[in-house]
Image: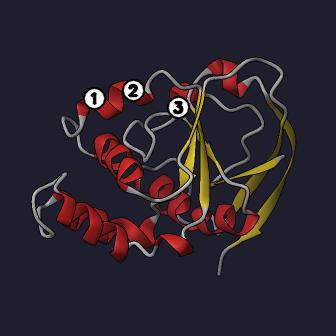
Amino acid sequence: MFLYHGSYCEVAVPDISKCAAHKDFGKGFYLTTSKEQAEKFIGTALKKAKSQGIISEEQEYGVVSTYCFTPTKKLNLHIFTEADTEWLHCVVAHRKEGTFPEVRQQINQYDIVAGKIADDATNFTIVAYLSGVYGSIGSEEADRFCISRLLPERLKDQFCFRTERAISCLNYVGSERIWRK
C-alpha cells in the first residue's frame, strides 16, 4: 500500500522524536492514502514552519514524500472504521490533556492507529465541542451533534505510525516538490 506525507521538506527517514504530540491519534508520523490530502496539508506545514523560523518566508513549495507500507513485523494496529463516538473521543483525548484519559491510555498500546482525519476544515467543530458549545464533553447529545457537523462521509483517512517498529515497515519511494500559489 502506498502512503503519502505532506510537509515543507522531503522526509526520507521519518523521525518520531520530531513529531508533535497533540495530533488526532497522538504523537507519531502521519500519512494518508490520498496524495491530494497530503498536498493540501502542505499549506499548513508551510505556515507553521515559517512562523517558527524553520524555513524562509519566501519558500513557496512543499514536498509530498511517498512510502510503500509493507508490514514485515507483527504490529498492534487499531483502525477506526468510522468517525463515530470512539473516534471523536480519541481525537479529543489527544487534543486536550486530561480529557478521556482512559482512551489515551488504550491507544498508547498500538503501533499504528488509522481512521478519518480531523483536519483544518473540521477544527472549528472540534474546538466548539471542547468548549462545551454542543453540551457536556462526552455526553451523548454533544457527541452526536459534533459528529454530524463534521460531515464524516467527506473526511479522508490518516495513519499514525507511533513506534519505531511501525516506521521500520515504511519503505521510502521518493518525493515530489509541490508549488503553492
Would you say 39 lies left or right of 72 here? left
Q: What residue is disc 2 on?
A: 106
Residue drawn at (35%, 67%), measured in percent from left and top? 147
The answer to which image quadrant residue 72 occupies is: top right
Residue drawn at (19%, 57%), measured in percent from left and top? 130
Task: Say what amino acid the circle numbered 2 marks.
Answer: Gln
Residue 154 is marked as none
- Element type at marker 1? helix
Give the camera-side residue of 50 and 28. Answer: 28
Q: Is the residue 20 above or below the residue 144 in the image? A: above
Residue 151 image offset from top left, x and y in percent: 44, 76
- Element type at marker 3? helix
Badge 2: residue crowd in 10 Å (few <14, some 14–19, many ≥20): few
Would you say 107 lies left or right of 162 here? left
Q: Quadrant of the C terminus?
A: bottom right
Badge 1: residue crowd in 10 Å (few <14, some 14–19, many ≥20): few
Q: Are marks 1 and 2 in contact (CB under 8 Å)?
A: yes
Task: Say what amino acid the circle numbered 1 marks.
Answer: Glu
Give the camera-side residue of 108 and 42. Answer: 108
Badge 3: residue crowd in 10 Å (few <14, some 14–19, many ≥20): few
Q: Of circles 2 and 3, which is in front?
A: 2
Q: What residue is disc 1 on?
A: 102
Q: Is the residue 105 above or below the residue 172 in the image? A: above
Which numbered disc flags the more N-terminal residue, 1 or 3? 3
Q: CA distance from mark 1 to mark 3?
A: 25 Å
Residue 165 image offset from top left, x and y in percent: 68, 18
Residue 141 image offset from top left, x and y in percent: 18, 66
The answer to which image quadrant residue 149 occupies is: bottom left
Residue 18 is marked as 3
Q: CA distance from mark 2 to mark 3?
A: 23 Å
